[in-house]
Image: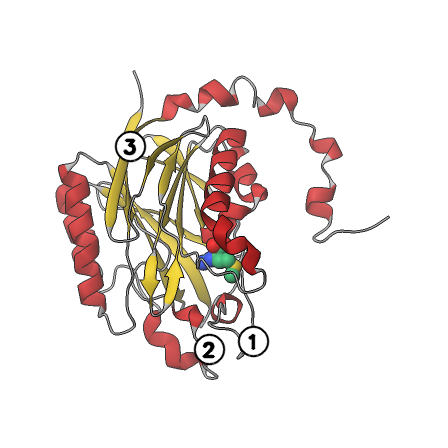
Amino acid sequence: MTRIITIGAAQLGPINRTDTREVVVQRLIALLRQAHSAGCDLVVFPELALTTFFPRWFVEDISETNHYYETEMPSPITAPLFDEAKRLGIGFCLGYAELTAQGERFNTQILVEKDGSVVAKYRKVHIPGHEHNEPDRAFQHAERYYFTPSEEGFGVWKAFGARVGMMICNDRRWPESYRVMGLQGVELILCGYNTPIHYIPDPSQDILQGFHNALVMQSGAYQNGTWVVGVAKGGLEEGVDSLGQSMIVAPSGQIVAQALTTDDELIMAHCDMDWCARYTQTLFDFDRYRRPEVYTRITAQRGVELQ
Ligand code: CDT
């Protein structure tokens, strides 16, 4: 018997600063209904899917940005999404900014099963960008000011009849993210992202954004024998152009579905979880072929050390 999960990647177009949560939640519900009509079991939304990408602005008093964060999930404003998903019997994965009761700020993704139960919460590990205001930049990428990096790492959970992991945006560029989940037998990795096309520290990378996006997710999928679902918030948002190109990648590394626009767009694929074993039990049989005894530097040091 095959284990097929029909997965929708619900790309979002821009969310403006003035857009209310209610309006955004209605956009998510419209995509959720479209996914349900198309037979999806699970729909994946982007990173920070409820608001504009606010780390592009710096404010001296961080508490002025509290309205961008969620203090509970579901909340009265997001409850309609949870209720509709449960009514339709469709699962979802949603990225949002989280402000805890202890005052910690995380870039978070939540996974909800088809029966409405919360499977897991993942908090972003690799926080890119800068900590301080850099007024000479065309726009800020102050994620390191707005979010604490999670110490919880990368988990894998049993859900949708598979072994499911999560990561968020910049995590997808680091091979360790995939491998830590690969070592827990992951079969499906869900990843939301917001990737500005213009990379201010090195603009020569701008034209390569789409290439790098595909490169990391295709290699991560192949080298760990897992499905990867990458979902963008793309398009021109508050003057900053961001990559679309949401995609669903098979354990072979092949792209099986890809967004054509930078707007709200649903792509989908029938994802056979048994395809993973064709890689994890052959070429990437970790137990047989890995050599962890010669990889000790990976966890022993952070940066490059010259001999
Ligand atoms: N959201 C996020 O992590 N974006 C980064 C942008 C590059 S670092 C400024 C990314 O890796 O796509």
Q: Position of residue 206 (x, y in %)?
A: 50, 55
Looking at this view, is 46 or 120 the one in front? 46
> Where is residue 307 drawn, in percent x and y?
86, 48
- Tell me residue 305's x, y (percent): 79, 51
- On the question of residue 122 being in view, the answer is yes
Residue reaching furthest right?
A: 307
Position of 264 with respect to 212 (left or right) is left
Give the residue displayed 57% in from the left and 41% down from the top: 175
Where does label 3 land, which residue?
269
Question: Do we see residue 7 in this rendering?
Answer: no
Q: Earlier in the sequence, mark 3 or mark 1?
A: 1
Name the residue rendered at 24%, 47% in the picture: 265
The Cα atoms of the two marked residues, 3 and 1, are separated by 41 Å
Disc 2 to disc 3, C-alpha distance: 39 Å
Residue identifier under label 1? 132
Instruction: Determine whether the residue tagged by mark 2 lies in a helix, strand or loop.
Output: loop
Q: How far, Cα to Cα, is label 2 from label 1? A: 8 Å
Disc 3 marks a residue whose amino acid type is: Ala
* Image position of 73 (left or right of 219): left
Q: Are marks 3 and 1 in contact (CB under 8 Å)?
A: no
User: Which residue carries the number 2 mark?
Assistant: 58
Q: Quadrant of residue 53?
A: bottom left
Q: In the picture provided, is 121 more to the left or to the right than 132?
A: left
Q: Amino acid at mark 2?
A: Phe
Asked if 286 appears above or below 61 in the picture, the reply is above
